[in-house]
Image: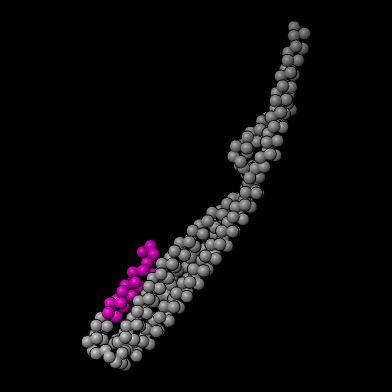
Amino acid sequence: MTVSSTTSLTNNSINLNSNLTKLSSGSRINSAADDASGMAIANAMSAQVRGLGQAIQNSNNAIGMVQIADGAMQEYSSIVTDVRGLTLKASSPIMNSSNRAIIQNEIDALLSSANNIINTTSYNGMSLLRGDNDFTFQTGANAGENIDINFGNASSILPKVDVSNATSIEDSLKNIDSALESAGIIMTNLGAGQNALESNVRNISVSQINTASAESQIRDLDFAAESANFNKNKILDQTGIFALVQKNVVQANVLKLFQ
């Protein structure tokens, strides 16, 4: 067997192994030797795809947090609206001091409930409405891709209500209207934040799909072409082995002539 023949067979065997590896994995790039630059690009894209997936999860978690806060603020506003109705009821001249005292007790109970909503609304142990936390959500695959949402401080807007007399009722109505206005601002900010998060999820979902597709174009194997290469190399391998066998037979017969 000559050196060139051995080298040819060895190279062909390497090609066959490469064909089999690619066909079994379904990937064109299984090591840096297959395509070093292509692997580097594909790996970077793979990291980006995973990062975008985590960003989608982060955004969905943030949406859940915002929805909890918004639902609590809606209930808070509903309670304060009920308090306003009772305050107006107490303003009627037909109400005596005893009637207003009963209404005051009902108002106090409602305000206590509203205050409890503010103090207990939380997500994963974090208070949402007391202004204790500033929330910045990582909503992209890269550094600096964040969305800030102002949850507000609802504990500072609980109205003081006193329906014992006409003057205090007038002041109380102003306090209630101010509280409702502040609650509306908080809900507006939460709504804008949720819209931004939902838009972000839609945008990065498209980016994730497109990036994954681009990575696939680099990594994925052309099965038809690779199968054709495999068959070609298999034939060459079989032909090479057959030729070497025949060559060895001829050489053996020649040696017999000199014996």
> Along the line of sight, which residue is nearer the eye, 160 or 164?
164
Residue situated furthest left in the rendering: 98
Residue 112 image position (x, y, % from top left): 29, 76
State which region is magenta.
Answer: 106-131
Q: Quadrant of the N terminus?
A: top right
Horizontal arrangement in the rendering, residue 119 relative to residue 141 (left or right): left
User: Residue, x 27% and y 91% (percent of image)?
Assistant: 94
User: Residue, x 66% and y 40% (percent of image)?
Assistant: 223
> Along the line of sight, which residue is nearer the eye, 194 or 219?
194
Q: Tell me the quarter of the picture where residue 143 sits.
A: bottom right
Q: Is residue 91 in view?
A: yes
Q: Quadrant of the C terminus?
A: top right
Residue 255 image position (x, y, % from top left): 75, 11
Horizontal arrangement in the rendering, residue 67 relative to residue 53 (left or right): left
What's the image's color scheme? one colour
Counting the numbered discs, the total is 0
User: Residue, x 36% and y 68% (percent of image)?
Assistant: 121
Q: Is residue 109 shown in magenta?
A: yes
Residue 57 image position (x, y, % from top left): 49, 58
Horizontal arrangement in the rendering, residue 212 relative to residue 253 (left or right): left
Residue 215 image position (x, y, % from top left): 62, 51
Q: Is residue 53 shown in magenta?
A: no
